[in-house]
Image (cartoon, rainbow, N blue to C red):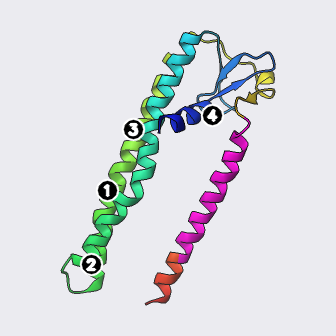
Amino acid sequence: MISLMNRVADAHFRKDSNGRLVFIPFTLRRKCYFVDSKADEEKIRAFVNMHRIPSTLISLLISPIVMVPGFILEDYGGLTPRAHRLTVALGVSGFFWVSIVAFAVMLWGVYIATVPGLTASLSEVAPEIKAQLSAISPEQRGRRVALVCLLACLIVLVLALVALTGLSR
């Protein structure tokens, strides 16, 4: 898990044409910063990992945490009309989903609030240099393609499940 998070943290760093390390807190369209010392790099990487590990865990856990209570209540809820069981199952699952999404939004708010203080001592990258930034790892493009394919497969799976449940009624 740690090596995966280190690779995710690498997505926030690029090198310019002179070999200087650049920290990209959000996107290339927003502010980017030169990281000149190893101590600053380690501090920023630790901060990015501290934010990304809970974010990744939330992303991985949100589906089972939302679905399991719904399935349990749907099957063992004991309410006689199916519509009542489904309403209760969706309500409980919705509560868990809203709670987890609220935690993720809070975590994102902490990240946004902390970045300016973290980068106060760093010099900002000029817009013309941003266009020349290269990725540290050449595998990042391949990872993006794999992520897009995975997302497309998940969307197709969800649409198939919706179609199957709609046809069974």
Position of residue 92 relative to residue 87, above or below, is above
Q: CA distance from mark 2 to mark 4?
A: 43 Å
Query: Which residue sits at x=56%, y=64%?
Result: 154
Q: Residues within 10 Å of mark 3 (few under 14, many from 20)?
A: few
Tell me the kind of residue under disc 3. Met
Name the secondary structure under disc 3. helix
Residue that extends furthest to the left in the rendered view of this protein: 78
Name the secondary structure under disc 2. helix
Q: CA distance from mark 4 to mark 1?
A: 30 Å
Reading the image, the residue beneath label 2 is 75
Q: Residues within 10 Å of mark 4 (few under 14, many from 20)?
A: some
Q: Quadrant of residue 21?
A: top right
Horizontal placement of 149 versus 50: left or right?
right
- The residue range painted magenta reads 138-160
Say which mark, if any, is on residue 96: 1
If the image is split into quadrants, where does the C terminus sit? bottom left
Q: Position of residue 143 (x, y in %)?
A: 66, 46
- Return the disc, 1 or 3, that comes first in the chain's sequence: 1
Say which mark, if any, is on residue 164: none
| CB contact under 8 Å: marks 3 and 2 | no
- Return the disc, 3 or 2, that comes first in the chain's sequence: 2
How many numbered discs sit on the rendered protein?
A: 4
Reading the image, the residue beneath label 4 is 11
Taking the magenta stretch, the answer to whether it contains residue 127 is no
- Return the disc, 4 or 1, that comes first in the chain's sequence: 4
| CB contact under 8 Å: marks 4 and 1 | no
Query: Which residue sits at x=36%, y=56%?
Result: 97
